[in-house]
Image (cartoon, helix red, strand yellow):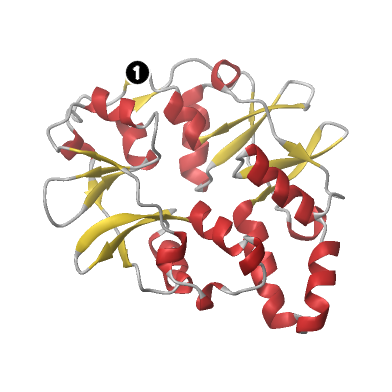
Amino acid sequence: MRFDNSSFATASDLASAAFTVDKSDRLSHALSLMEKHRVNQLLVVSDGELIGILTKRGIARTLGASEDLIKPASSLHVAKAMEDIFEAASGALPVGAVARLFKSSDIVVVVNGPPPKWITFDEIVKAVRPTGVASDIMDPPATCSSYDRVTHVRRRMIDENKWWMTVTEENKLVGIITENDIAKAMSHFRDIVKSYYQDSRVRKLLVDDIMVADVVFARTNTSCEAVIDLMLQHDVEGVPILDPEDAMVGIITQSTVLRNLD
């Protein structure tokens, strides 16, 4: 673990203003706030009290649940998708100790009183980053084919606890698909497909129909610092890793980076 900026000594030095949403608000409103502020999470409040965290992953998993498969985000409330477990830290906590909290959480809430503040991936990597190159910390890739059915990939994501998968053909990267992509695609069916056709159409949906083909990637010999810079520059939560022959060999996500902070 390398400390990159000596001006960050404590949690208070790193913390930034958090964005909040009420537990009774609609998920569609929460998604709009996330897009407006370019964040992947919101703190959830009720009567001014912090009660949980809402993430894009939580929204995607809620919208993709079988009972809510074709319900739009406008019909569901924040309380249905929020998590009520999060890491909290005093503002006086040293940066090294803050980094260790990220072993079990993707966000740390700084509890020095109102207004609420947080430390996310963007903040922590301003102060500390893994050393070495991509091959030192990358995780094995979770892959699927562009011809796989989306419902099958969705089930794999749940069973394997994956947020997104790389799409490969003959071990070459052709795209990525995330839970967020799946949730949005399925929820849109309510608006564009008549109800009695929806189940059939959803089951026929292929990865190729909704995957992102323009993918930011790195090489096995790319420095960890450069990989993180790519993630921040392109506002992505993960980067596929290719070897010198362009074969898909690994992946580095925000969680990968946070696990390797020491």
The N terminus: image quadrant: top left
Residue placed at 52% from the left, 43% from the top? 237
The 10 Å Cα crowd at callout 1, few under 14, some 14 to 19, many 20 or more, is few
Q: Position of residue 201 (x, y in %)?
A: 83, 70
Q: Residue at x 67, y 72 (%)?
A: 70
Determine whether 89 is above or below 204 in the image.
Answer: above
Residue 134's quadrant in the figure?
top right
x and y percent of residue 182 in the render?
67, 58
**Front residue (pair 71, 3):** 71
Circle 1 SS class:
strand
Q: Quadrant of the C terminus?
A: top left
The quadrant in which residue 150 appears is: bottom right
Task: Give the image quarter of residue 53.
Answer: bottom left
Amino acid type at mark 1 = Arg
Q: Which residue is mark 1?
A: 2
Residue at 12 percent across and 33 percent down: it is: 92
Residue at 66 percent across and 67 percent down: it is 69
Q: Is residue 230 above or below residue 112?
A: above
Residue 251 screen position, x and y as percent: 63, 31
- In this view, the residue in front, 68 or 87, is 68
Q: Is residue 213 visible?
A: no
Q: Is residue 114 left or right of residue 71?
A: left
Is the residue 135 above or below the residue 69 in the image?
above
Which is more toward the observer, 124 or 232? 124
Q: Percent from the top left, x then y, of residue 36?
A: 41, 66
